[in-house]
Structure formats: C-alpha cells, structure tokens
Amino acid sequence: MPLRFGLFGTGPWATATQAPAIVAHPDAELVGVWGRDPAKAAALAGESGARAYSDVDALLADVDAIALALPPDVQAEIAERAAKAGRHLLLDKPVALTVEAADRVVAAADAAGVASVVFFTGRFDDTVATALREITATGGWQGSRVAHLASIFVPGNPYGASPWRRAHGGLWDVGPHALSQVLPVLGPVAEVSAVEGPRSTTSLLLRHTAGAVSTMTLSVDAPPAAVLRDVTFYGEHGVTSVPNGTGGVQKAFTTAIDVLIAEIAGTTHPLGVHFGREVVAILAAAERSRETGRAETL
C-alpha cells in the first residue's frame, strides 16, 4: 500500500515541490491538502487529485504521514499534533523558531515512535550528498567558510512575499541549509558568535566541539549581483568545495520521501527531528549573540 500523505501548506514551495513530488511518487499517495487559506487549499487539492480539508484533525485521521510547507512556528505546532496522533513526519527546515518548540516536536515524535525526516534540500541532492560523504571520509578538516547569499525580495520571486522570511531573514532561512552541510563534516557546535551586517546579513563564527572553526555569511536580501552559494572546507589535505545541487528540488523531495519510507521500514538516517532540533539550537544561540554582542555557548 502506498504511504498516504496529508500536505499542510499551499504556498509556492508546496505547489512547486511537495505536491507534485508526492503525486508522482510510486509508493506515495496525496490524500488531502490543508491550508490557512481554504481557497488555495481547494485549488491545490484540485490540481493534485486530492481532497481539500478544513480541519487539521480530520486530515490527520485519514493519512499515515504528513508533509509540511508552512512557516516554522505554524509547522512546529502541527508537527507536534501529528506526531501525537501517530503520523510520520516529513518536515521543512527550520523545524521551529524556538528551541522550546523544537523540543516539543522531538518529544512527541520520540514518544509516539514515528519516523521523521527534515527536508534540508541539498542533503537530498545526489551531487551534494556524494560530495559530503567523500569530504567526511577524507577527514583532517580544520574549518570551513560558507557564503549563502540569496536575493528573494526582487520582483517576481515568489518567496519575497513570505512574512516569516522577511522577519527572520537569512539566519533562519538559508542558515539551516548551511549548517546541514557543515555539521556532518566538522561535528557539533560548542559556541557561536554573530554580528549583523548591511541588508540584514548575518555573519557567524562557530567553534565546533572537536576544535574546528567555521564561518558563515547568510542573507536573503543580498544585491542581485552578489548572489552566491559557497561551502568550502580546508585542512590537512588542502581545500575543497561542495558543489551546488544538480537534480532539482522535486527530485530531492522524492529522495526525502524514499528516506522516510525506508525509516518506517527500519532503516535509520541522520536527518530527523533530532538533527532539526540541533540546527534550531544553533540558530537561536546565534540570534542571542547578535542581540547581545557576546558569544553564546550551546
């Protein structure tokens, strides 16, 4: 039997990525769509051959798993509710906007014994995943530098109208992507310092527990001519960079569905809600450091 999904969210990410990937997956079925705008939920459900739901619990009752494409604070509440109902979780990043909310999601998922995957897009791209495995296996890395500069507030960009991205900026939007590629190579973070730059850019200095040091520059409001995505490691064997993804977001989300199905069957993976909570903790510490001007320990 296919894994029956409920999709929560009706924005551009849901319509361009989650819905078509679930519909096309041979081992998944999109049962229903819920959204804060009933008209958009009805439209997306109609396009996807699914049913629009007006009640969260009614949709949870009809599915095995949920996929979420909602603002992080809304996502955390529904994810906790779904886990308590015994539904498997395919979440977006970041899992939540506070450590406390992320902890509640983790606790609910652990208590219910449900499978979970957090969709850090690049980690599910074959090119990126292969490069990170090879870099991690090489070892001897002393640090990394990351620049993830997006420019979403330009005419025609569908994500520029996102209130949570405008409010929380690159730290919370592209920061999770950066951390998802650095942490598997350099390990957990012990201390973080953050400063704010022009156009709401946030720069981070991270000290990892194993001794490595990494830097990150993050923005979603960079000048269009300065858009950049670079993840570079340096160490005993020289310098190497992680290539950008090549497979597209729908293919990456298809892989995330595969991973969730495999975990339900008993295969473990590193990108569940515990890793999602680790990322939230680093982002929250960075936010405190940016406000106080002091380094924050984790």
Image: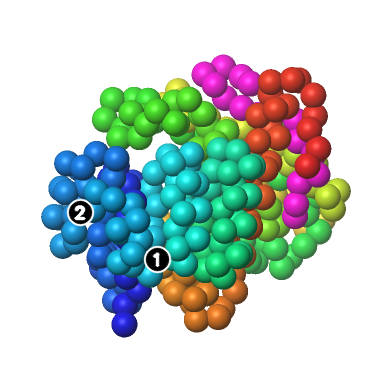
Picture residue at 59% right of the left edge, 74% below the top: 268
Q: What x and y, as percent, mark residue 59? A: 30, 59
Q: What x and y, as percent, mark residue 225? A: 43, 26
| Furthest residue toward top | 198
Q: Amino acid at mark 1?
A: Ala
Residue range (magenta): 187-203
Residue 269, visible in the rendered structure: yes
Foreground of the two, 87 or 162: 87
Q: What x and y, as percent, mark residue 200? A: 54, 21
Q: Which numbered tag is attached to residue 52? A: 2
Picture residue at 44% right of the left edge, 50% below the top: 78
Corner quadrant of residue 230? top right
Position of 153 compared to 106: left or right? left
Foreground of the two, 220 or 297: 297
Counting residues from the start of the chain, the first of labels 2 and 1 encountered is: 2
Picture residue at 56% right of the left edge, 17% below the top: 198
Corner quadrant of residue 247? bottom left
Image quadrant occupied by the C terminus: top right
* Number of marks drawn: 2
Q: Which numbered tag is attached to residue 65? A: 1
Q: Residues within 10 Å of mark 2 (few under 14, many from 20)?
A: many
Q: Residues within 10 Å of mark 1 (few under 14, many from 20)?
A: many
Position of 27 compared to 84: left or right? left
